[in-house]
Image: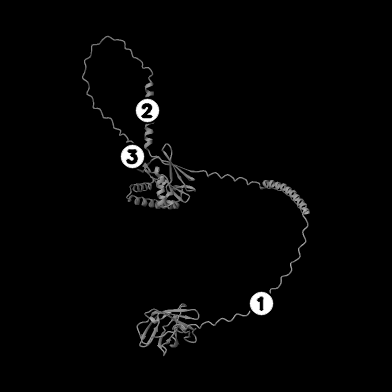
């Protein structure tokens, strides 16, 4: 149990609620744990932690929240209303969780939900406290005991019945007088003893009656608020060791070692001088060897020049040639063909076409400007009579500029080489179309 605030109540006139025959305060750890996991720490701290005494007539309620403790009655009217509103909101959340668990299929969950529902009850608002900024309810899971109904019934006093008048006795004949005899009256010993026993018996009956009635009469809760003493201060750390003690010892040892090393050094110097004196003098250096003779120079004739390399073989049809007649077989176009470099207009940078086709005459155009910008568009080649028409499509270049469709019209010359001319109208400044410009190129296989 952890906490710095203790709320102690003497419980009289209240009746505990419970499940499975056990009061709720015996399962407070499970109840507070479910509330903490399913709702929040503030909801769990609303319910004080109970600690019954050994006799069972008093329960000490603890709160783990630090701060000043104030009962609800000691708060101002505005603070009292705000505290009750906080308590009602937290209690409503706990009651809603209890109702949700009571609808669960598990019997344990339903019992837990019932326990949460009963934990929301308290005898009155006198059991509400404010600990710091946290509202705390003590004596939760209890309800007021209807003690008045348990008092023994007051006996009803009945008036004694009025006795009917007794008829006068019949006249008795006078007896014959007898001779007088002496009468002896016995005196009672201790006449006060009977009164003493009756008084003692009355006192005992009064004490027994008061004890029995005390068990049923309601008694106001006695609330004492005790602040636990703060934890003891931690012990002071030990004083740091004095480094001078170890340093002085090390200094003395170093000085003694220095004297030994000096003596050893002097002994080694003397030994070195004795060995140096015993060494023979060095031999004179030998004369240097004669210089080597220069190598004989042999005149070498120059190598004959290598034969000239054979002339390169002419490339196989590097320029696009067209078949003698129009055909639907476009296998002669299969591959990539690069056009001559040219300018569309004087203000445009130079560039060149590159067409790549498959055997069906379908492919792609890549136009590369000298600035490195590329424009890609699908291309298609088809015969129109004896003329091979190659057309691409409008697209956007890599720098975001527009590209207008090019059309090449290729016709064979006398040698069958394709002479291609085209036209285009690239957009000018402001997106306006320039007048159509014509150009002539030849396509070379790459």
Q: Nearer the viewer, residue 349 or 226?
A: 349
Q: Name the residue under label 3.
A: 149
Q: Position of residue 445 (x, y in %)?
A: 44, 81
Q: Could you say whether the residue bearing mark 1 is in a helix, strand or loop?
A: loop
Q: Is residue 223 above or below residue 294?
A: above
Q: How crowded is mark 1: few (under 14 residues within 10 Å), some or many (20 or more)?
A: few
- Disc 1 or disc 2, which is closer to the eye? 1
- Does 174 sit left or right of 47 as displayed? left
Measure the C-alpha gap from mark 1 to mark 2. Answer: 162 Å
- Disc 3 or disc 1, which is closer to the eye? 1
Tell which circle, 3 or 1, labels the residue nearer the N-terminal end: 3
Tell which circle, 1 or 2, labels the residue nearer the N-terminal end: 2
Measure the C-alpha gap from mark 3 to mark 2. Answer: 27 Å
Q: Which residue is drawn at 35% across and 84% down?
A: 327
Q: Nearer the viewer, residue 191 or 253?
A: 253
Measure the C-alpha gap from mark 3 to mark 1. Answer: 146 Å
Q: Is residue 23 above or below residue 103?
A: above
Q: Could you say whether the residue bearing mark 2 is in a helix, strand or loop?
A: helix
Tell which circle, 3 or 2, labels the residue nearer the N-terminal end: 3
Residue 316 lies in quadrant: bottom left
Q: Which of 315 and 432 is in front in this view?
A: 315
Q: How crowded is mark 3: few (under 14 residues within 10 Å), some or many (20 or more)?
A: few
Q: Name the residue under label 1.
A: 298
Q: Nearer the viewer, residue 148 or 269?
A: 269
- Does 326 sit left or right of 274 as displayed? left
- Does 257 sit left or right of 437 as displayed? right
Q: Residues within 10 Å of mark 2 (few under 14, many from 20)?
A: few
């Amino acid at each position: 149990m952890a906490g710095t605030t203790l709320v102690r109540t003497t419980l009289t006139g209240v009746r505990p609620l419970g499940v499975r025959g056990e009061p709720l305060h015996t399962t407070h750890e499970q109840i507070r744990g479910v509330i903490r996991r399913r709702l929040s720490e503030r909801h769990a701290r609303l319910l004080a932690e109970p600690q019954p005494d050994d006799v069972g007539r008093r329960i000490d309620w603890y709160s783990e929240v630090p701060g000043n403790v104030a009962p609800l009655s000691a708060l101002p009217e505005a603070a009292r209303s705000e505290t009750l509103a906080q308590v009602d909101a937290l209690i409503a959340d706990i009651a809603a969780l209890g109702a949700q668990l009571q609808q669960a299929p598990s019997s344990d969950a339903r019992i837990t939900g019932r326990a949460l529902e009963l934990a929301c009850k308290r005898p009155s608002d006198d059991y509400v406290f404010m600990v710091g900024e946290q509202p705390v309810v003590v004596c939760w899971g209890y309800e007021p005991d209807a003690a008045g109904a348990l008092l023994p019934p007051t006996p009803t006093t009945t008036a004694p019945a009025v006795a009917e008048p007794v008829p006068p006795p019949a006249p008795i004949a006078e007896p014959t007088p007898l001779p007088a005899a002496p009468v002896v009256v016995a005196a009672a010993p201790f006449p006060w003893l009977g009164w003493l026993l009756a008084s003692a018996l009355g006192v005992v009956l009064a004490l027994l009656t008061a004890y029995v009635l005390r068990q049923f009469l309601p008694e106001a809760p006695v609330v004492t608020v005790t602040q636990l003493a703060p934890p003891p201060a931690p012990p002071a750390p030990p004083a740091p060791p004095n480094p001078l003690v170890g340093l002085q010892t090390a200094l003395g040892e170093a000085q003694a070692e220095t004297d030994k090393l000096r003596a050893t050094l002097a002994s080694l110097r003397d030994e070195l001088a004795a060995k140096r004196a015993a060494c023979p003098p060095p031999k004179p250096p030998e004369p240097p060897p004669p210089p080597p003779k220069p190598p004989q120079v042999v005149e070498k004739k120059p190598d004959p020049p290598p034969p000239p390399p054979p002339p390169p073989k002419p490339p196989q049809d590097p320029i696009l040639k067209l078949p003698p007649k129009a055909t639907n077989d476009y296998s002669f176009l299969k591959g990539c063909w690069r056009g001559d470099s040219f300018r569309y207009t004087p203000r445009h940078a130079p560039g060149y076409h590159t067409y790549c086709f498959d055997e069906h005459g379908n492919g792609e155009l890549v136009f590369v400007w000298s600035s490195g910008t590329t424009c890609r568009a699908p291309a298609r080649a088809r015969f129109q009579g004896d003329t091979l028409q190659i057309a691409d499509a409008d697209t956007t270049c890599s720098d975001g500029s527009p590209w207008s469709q090019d059309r090449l019209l290729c016709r064979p010359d006398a040698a069958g080489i394709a002479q291609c001319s085209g036209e285009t109208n690239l957009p000018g400044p402001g997106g306006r179309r320039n007048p159509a410009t014509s150009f002539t190129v030849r396509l070379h296989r790459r």
